[in-house]
């Protein structure tokens, strides 16, 4: 049975969470939604809160997984992260944060590319 796009995306997010957990990050939440957008994974890396965008591109016909995180997508992620901080973090100004990207061309733990600090606010 062929996986549809939503199932493939969910599978990619599960693999990304497993991969990052194996590398010492701790899960906070998955698929955080607000009016600005969605953040796939939110985890902690020591004392840093990490907002993670997971991108699966099995076909590079329309660009790579990395190139799909456009400046517009970055802005949505930043606004969504700010919303999360306002709603869930008491001391926002003292909380270290970063944006990471997990890039995949197939749903396989061996094919994961992890970009720490994928972009700055």
Image (spheres, rainbow, N blue to C red):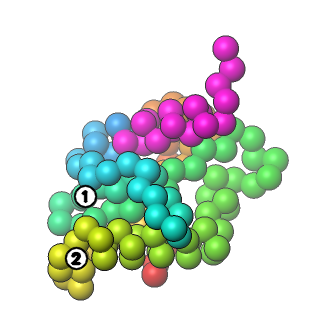
- Residue 38, x across and y down, in percent: 50, 59
Residue 92 visible to the viewer:
yes
Label 2: few (<14), some (14–19) or many (≥20) C-alpha neighbours in 10 Å: few
Would you place residue 81 above or below residue 5 in this image? below
Q: Is 110 left, or right, of 104 in this rendering?
A: left
- Residue 46, x across and y down, in percent: 18, 60
Residue 101 visible to the viewer:
no
- Label 2 SS: loop
The dot on residue 30 is none
Label 1: few (<14), some (14–19) or many (≥20) C-alpha neighbours in 10 Å: some
Q: Is 44 left, or right, of 119 in this rendering?
A: left
Report the front residue among 59 and 14: 14
Q: Earlier in the sequence, mark 2 or mark 1?
A: 1
- Residue 41, x across and y down, in percent: 39, 52
- Residue 53, x across and y down, in percent: 49, 56
The single residue placed furthest to the front in the displayed view is: 35
| Residue matched to label 2 | 95
- Label 1 SS: strand
The single residue placed furthest to the right in the displayed view is: 61
User: Which residues lie in the magenta part?
Assistant: 1-17
Q: Is 96 left, or right, of 6 in this rendering?
A: left
Residue at (65, 68) in percent of width and height: 70
Residue at (61, 63) in percent of width and height: 69
Do the CB atoms of the residues marked 2 and 1 lie less than 8 Å apart? no
The residues tagged by marks 2 and 1 sit, at their Cα atoms, a distance apart of: 11 Å
The dot on residue 44 is 1
């Amino acid at each position: 049975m062929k996986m549809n796009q939503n199932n493939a995306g969910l599978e990619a997010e599960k693999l990304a969470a497993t991969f990052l957990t194996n590398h010492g990050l701790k899960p906070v939440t998955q698929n955080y939604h607000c009016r600005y957008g969605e953040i796939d994974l939110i985890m902690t890396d020591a004392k840093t809160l990490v907002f993670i965008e997971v991108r699966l591109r099995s076909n590079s016909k329309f660009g790579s997984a990395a190139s799909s995180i456009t400046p517009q997508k970055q802005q949505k992620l930043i606004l969504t992260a700010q919303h999360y901080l306002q709603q869930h973090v008491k001391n926002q100004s003292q909380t270290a944060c970063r944006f990471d990207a997990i890039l995949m061309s197939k749903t396989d733990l061996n094919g994961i590319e992890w970009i720490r600090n994928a972009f700055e606010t």
